[in-house]
Image (tube, coloured by chain):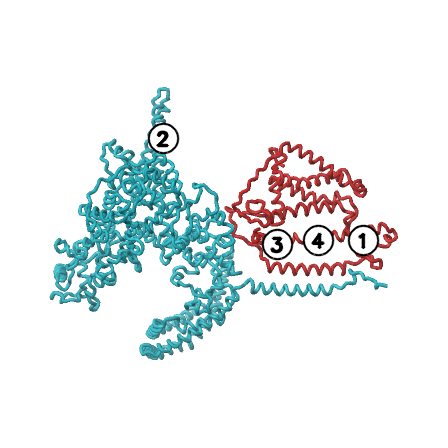
Chain colours: A red, B cyan
Amino acid sequence: MDLHQLWTILATPDNVPIVLLALAVPFYTWYGLRQSFANDRLIAQLEADPALARTHHRKTQPWRPEWDREVHVWPYLLRIEFLAALIVTVILLVWSILLNAPLEEPANPNLTMNPSKAPWYFVGLQEMLVYFDPWLAGVVIPFLIIVGLMAIPYIDTNPLGSGYYTFKQRKAAILTFLFGFLGLWLTMIFIGVFVRGPGWMWFWPGATWDHNRLVFEVNRDLPFGALFLAAYTAAAAWAIHKLITLTPFHRKIHARMSRFQYLVMQFFLILMLALPLKILLRQLFRIKYLLVTPWFNI
Amino acid sequence: MTPPVKDPVIHSSLSRPLAVSALLLLLALAWSLYDETYSIRPWKSYQSRFAKLYSRFLDQASAGQSELERNLKASPDYRALDSALQQSERESLPAVAAIDRQINQQLAPQILALNEPFQEVRSRIAALTYQLETSRSESAKTDLRRQIDQLKAETRFAALSAQLQSLKDEKARLLQQRVELMRPADALRARRDRYLADRLPGASTATISALRTSLTNFDIRIRQIHVKDVDLVDRCESCHLGAREPVTLTKASMGGEAVFASHPNPELLKLHDPEKFGCTPCHGGNGVAVASVEKAHGANKFWLWPLHAKENIQAGCQQCHAREILTEMAPTLNQGREIYRARGCIACHRYESFDREADEISSVTQQLRSIDQQKSAWTREAALSEAQANDPRTSDEDARKLLAHINDLKLRASLLDAQVDTLDTRSRSLVREVKKTGPSLKEVRAKLRPEWLPVWLKDPRQWREGTKMPSFRLADPEIRAISAFLWQSALAASPPPQAAGDPARGREAFETRGCLACHSLGEGSARQGGNFAANLSRIGEKADYSYLVRWIHNPRQRSAPYCAFEKRDLTAEDYRRHNLPFLFDLDHSRCPNDGHELQVQQMTPMPSLRLSEPEARDIASYLMTRKHDNVAYPDAPYLTDPALKSQGLALVRNYGCANCHEIAGLEEEPRIGTELTREGSKPIDRLDFALLTAQANAEGWLTHKGFFDRKLQNPAIFDTGKEKSAQERLKMPDFHLSKPEIDSVSTFLLGSVDATVPPRYFNTRGQDIADGWWVVAKYNCMGCHQLHPGQSSLLQLLPQYQDADSRDRLPPTLIGEGARVNPAWLLRFLANPALSDTLTDRNGVRPYLRVRMPSFSLSAGEVQKLARFFAALASQAQPFVAAPLDPLTASELTLARQLFASEAAPCLKCHMTGDPKHDARATAPSFALAPDRLQPAWVRRWLLDPALLAPGTAMPSGLFRREGDRFVFAGPTPPAFASYPKDHADLLTRFIFKTR
């Protein structure tokens, strides 16, 4: 266990945001979900008590019958936001005093540093380069991610859950987000920052980043990969369909969707699931490509 | 009833968190201001500390100084000067006061009064003139001209201008007059001040008080040197404030803070003005950074040019002085270069400007070969074309074209011949210049006892202390294979057997002929002599007597010549085929097969001492007695085992033996090491720390210095822990360098960087001197001669030359040689130090010296380099033009002859005359050589005071005394001299040179 190495990686000013991210994101996920579950209980209470529902319009917890139905933005929201702004400013000031921008040596076009890493917010993309061709990982997939994010409002036919925290009413959306953001994007950033060492080799945290390390890894193309790909697409489509029509509520939402909305959603979800699958195939079975064509490889 | 719970959104008060956050923000703001002002600007506290310490230092200095100054001012000399000054001032006072009065009370107010209206009018005229020049219509021009004329007339401009000019002239005349009046007083004041300055060791109180005044307005700010055209910004002096102060500050005097000390070598700063050179080009470090000491010194991982460590400080010289072998004031760097050159680093690691001869000779040989190919290709083409032209099917038109083409080819081939001639001429010089670090191994069979070879290879240092040969980490089977290969690849020829000599006489010759300037004898504390060449204490154990005789008689003699063009040693058979005698030397150096230059000499710097054969036999006999008693070497029957030969060849190739030694079949082996010309700026990632990387990183030596130091200390260190086959292991042998030696080589390598300054900063002055040092170092001239003040030759240090009159037995000092001798003569002398083609067993100039000036067989280029070197060292104008001397009149000739032969002038007592009986006892060079050899100006200076030019010379000083503006002979002069009005030294000089 090379604690010095671990500390060097954690304490690099460039990596401090990721360390903070690793703490802050789970906390706020928990915090948001806690509020969602509280609200969900309120929703259940209101649904069970139509009389109360008629008088009560504030859908967030905590609540009391005698409290105002509505509160004004000014001053009740803005004063909290002002407080938050103060605290964030203090944090930023102290951070900027304590940690300087990590400047490195003058650029030398003849010499690439090893490991050479993208800024932290792009390390996930860089990590994808391990699994896909540069054109796919660098151009096509980021493009589809952006298009997919843009498409969300258009394929979201669920009218509930706007303006308050709820889990019950937006289960599918929240789980998809958690899977995509925490499970894929942040995980890849963590791998890229903390696990990838010289030669972009896999070093478990605490292992010494040895520039001379040699590993034996041979990646092979999967025979009949196209069939596998087709089978995956069919299975994923079927599984996604099963999932989003699991409960009567979701069947109702599904019924509101047009055929086009449904197909777009399927397309992006199948694609999203394919990413971790490829990562697992590579890491566990050393599969290089599923589909090899003269123009592109998957 | 529970009290009603109030809505926290509305009723909870945020005052407390808001107040706390606001307070925190305020604190953070204060902290950031403090950080901005002090924490990230540590130089501010340095500056305030400096101001305090410096003013304290100046107080103390002025206290000590003023005491001394008071005493000096009270001295009668000073008082006399001072009163003379006051007297002179008093004398000139009335006249000066009158002038001042006239200027201040009359002229100045008048000029002032006139000046303003004059300038006003002139500006108006200028503005009108501009309008006139730029207006387009003729009528407007006329109008403007009229206006100008009118203005001039109204203001009487011409008169005004003339009056003003006359007033100014008058003022200038008066001021000039005042200066003339004050001149004697000013001269006296300068003399008085110089008197004081000469006797005050430190700065005068005036300087100190000026410094104090400047300190009162001491301004805390970044102090930077900005050299615009190099893009250099050095802020080092923001903390190192004392570096360039006019008084010397030490760590102790500045309260123990070394950061404020003055630059330790102001002489260097004078040569390299910081305003032009900055600090970081020499010292390294990050000149722009001021945020912390580490950053400014470049001690972070990401700065490629960190501050040089103290022991490597001279590394900074190398980037601009890269083409020199000797840089003044950089002894460590010089030592590093010398080790790199002499110990054979250069043999394996190319380095620009080192060993240029070897690179050039291989390029010349390459060119010769490619020209040869080109020529044969053209010959073939010409033959084909001719056949085609003669073919009846070819039309006349085509045949004509072909014939023209053939002529063309022949012409071009003739041009190639000219090129070949040039290359051959060049290689004729080069084969003389190129030297190998180690001895030729082609001669091992003639030279060595076979059993000795494996013993030597096992551990050269064990057998001969201080040897240049490094220790390779060889296993016994490897040693056997290498020995067998060397033995079998060597030439079979051996020199004719020699009769025995007299060891006693040989010993005397060895100790007096100058062998010890390069070679040493004796081991341990008994060791004596130079380390330029081998220690000969055990030579008798290994050498073949006949070979040794041949070597001492002429070390350059080879058993067979080597043809670089054919890549082989020639044999007698080659010569016989062309009906030529098997004779090869510097005068017979053409290959009988192809006409190209041969290597006819051993590639050793060891010169020929032009000893007679009997003397060579004596010395060899003496050396054969030098051995340890009862040493037995194990038999080595495997030396002749042919199976080992190919194995040995692979090993010899692998270890690069042929880089230092001449080995048959491996003459053109490339250097096996990496080039080191830019090693100091090689990216650190490309230095292979191997398995020690993590350790080096943790211990802080993952740096160039860390790499060089450790690699030189233990060349195999970066194999630690590696699983490697014998061939893959690091090959660099162990040179057994001491700590200072390692530091010096590290210094050299750390300085070998891509220059951070443009090439115009490189030192190109004194190119002749720099070139000369290379030749001097190559042949170890400094073993026998003193070349610059402060250096002593090796011979000078030997015990046999320690007594007073032994100086006369030493070779002459060469300080000022360029001013002493005529360069044309020097060229002849260096080419043939015997100054004779027949009487070679002697010194040309000083036959009375036992120490022999050897023949180095220098190439023409080297001889010229040396001549220019001596001229440049003595600041002589080049080219040399002999100053004409007035011819002696008949009476002067008589006078001079009388003086020369008189009893009082003992010239002929010591100087050689050409009379063999006299010359046997003479101890100074012959006058017959002087006209050719010497420069008259030097001879005159020499006559006047020889001890000044060569301290300790036997030539007596004080032969002449000054009388008015001429020198006259100090002893009793012949009576005829009474009426001779001219300079006696001059007369004697002209007499010496009369034969020219």
Residue A105 percent across, percent down from the top left: 52, 52
Q: Is residue B647 visible?
A: yes
Mark 2, other Cα within 10 Å: few <14 / some 14–19 / many ≥20: few
Q: Are marks 4 and 1 on the same chain?
A: yes
Could you tell me the amino acid type at mark 1? Lys
Query: Mark 3, mark 1: which one is toward the viewer?
Result: 3
In front here: B506 or B369? B506
Dot 4: chain letter? A
Real-space Cα separation, disc 2 to disc 1, in angstroms: 99 Å
Label 3 crowd bin: few (<14), some (14–19), many (20+), radius 10 Å: some
Question: SS of the residue at dot 4?
Answer: helix
Q: Is residue B362 left or right of residue A166?
A: left
Circles 4 and 1, Cβ within 8 Å, touching? The answer is no
Q: Position of residue B480 (x, y in %)?
A: 36, 40
Disc 3: host chain: A
State the count of labels: 4
Same chain check for tags 4 and 2: no
Q: Where does label 4 land, which residue?
A: A28
- Tell me the quadrant of the picture where the N terminus of chain B can be found: bottom right
Q: Which mark is residue A16?
A: 3
Nearest to the eye among marks 4 and 1: give it: 4
What residue is disc 1 on? A59
Label for residue B377? Answer: 2
The amino acid type, in three-letter code, at marker 2 is Ala
Residue B248 x %, y %? 41, 67
At which x and y percent is residue B994?
16, 56
